[in-house]
Amino acid sequence: MLVLGLTGSIGMGKSATAAMAEAAGIPVHSADAAVHRLYAGPLAAPIEALFPGTTRDGVVDREALARRVLGDPRAMMALEALVHPMVRAEEAAFLDACRAVGEKLVLLDVPLLFESGRTGAVDRILVVSAPAAVQRERVLARPGMTVEKFEAILARQMPDAEKRAKADYVIDTSKGLAAAERDLHAIIADLLGHDRRT
């Protein structure tokens, strides 16, 4: 089974690309989706204990939590120490289930694949990218996003050019959804072709 790692900086189109892969029949595990589930369940109480006032009705308030941890490296490390092991346990269970049913190719959507040293967990890396001006416009259009928050998030991420240089595949998502989907289907065909030859 080949594991394709999908990554890219904020606003580059990871979620849309992961949805396209799923629509093409590729099993997808999204770290962000796992975090959403965990924030609404098992992680809410430990996060509230660590950062009082960051949950509401038993669910983590992502805005409140972001205000508390962004720009504070020690707080961020404490949060990651809680979140990452649980996300990785979900990911491992996903991979085991896919292997058990004989999947040939799966996709792991990992926002900080390079930054967290997780490249060894995947066989190939797909980076989604777009020009900086497009990225900025997309991110600042999000509800609750500020320039300061955007810059704090960017500061934690490897520069886009470095990610592209380290990737096996790159999709430029600024060319539109149809072009991105064509590129993704070509990558899937390439990977499944490799898989059949080995």
Image: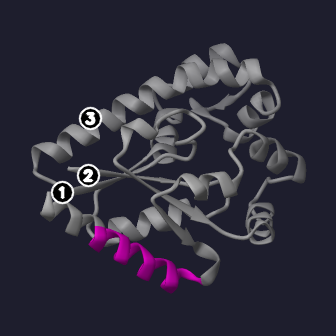
Is residue 166 at least partly visible in the picture? yes
Indicate whether 187 appears above or below 118: below
The question of residue 184 being in magenta is answered with: yes
Residue 149 in the image, given as x and y percentages of width and height? 83, 45
Q: Residue at x 52, y 33 (%)?
A: 117
Residue at the far top in the pictured view: 49
| Classed neighbour count for the residue bearing mark 1: other residues with Cα under 10 Å, few (<14), some (14–19), many (≥20) | some
Say which of 55 and 186 sits in front.
186
| Classed neighbour count for the residue bearing mark 2: other residues with Cα under 10 Å, few (<14), some (14–19), many (≥20) | some
Please report whichever mark, 3 or 1, sits nearer to the chain's N-terminal start. Answer: 3
Q: Residue at x 28, y 57 (%)?
A: 27
Indicate whether 165 appears above or below 65: below
Mark 3 vs 1: CB contact within 8 A: no
Q: Which mark is residue 2?
A: 2
Q: Which mark is residue 93?
A: 3
Say which of 36 and 147 sits in front.
147
Is residue 76 shown left or right of residue 23? right
Residue 192 in the image, given as x and y percentages of width and height? 22, 66
Q: Give the Cα separation between the discs numbered 3 and 1.
A: 16 Å
Mark 2 vs 3: CB contact within 8 A: no
Residues shaded magenta: 176-190
Q: Secondary structure at mark 2?
A: strand
Residue 29 in the image, given as x and y percentages of width and height? 37, 49
Q: Residue at x 69, y 43 (%)?
A: 157
Q: Amino acid at mark 1?
A: Lys
- From the image, which quarter does the C terminus lie in? bottom left
Q: Amino acid at mark 3?
A: Ala
Q: Which residue is mark 1?
A: 104
| Classed neighbour count for the residue bearing mark 3: other residues with Cα under 10 Å, few (<14), some (14–19), many (≥20) | few
Is residue 10 shown left or right of residue 24? right
Q: Residue at x 89, y 46 (%)?
A: 148
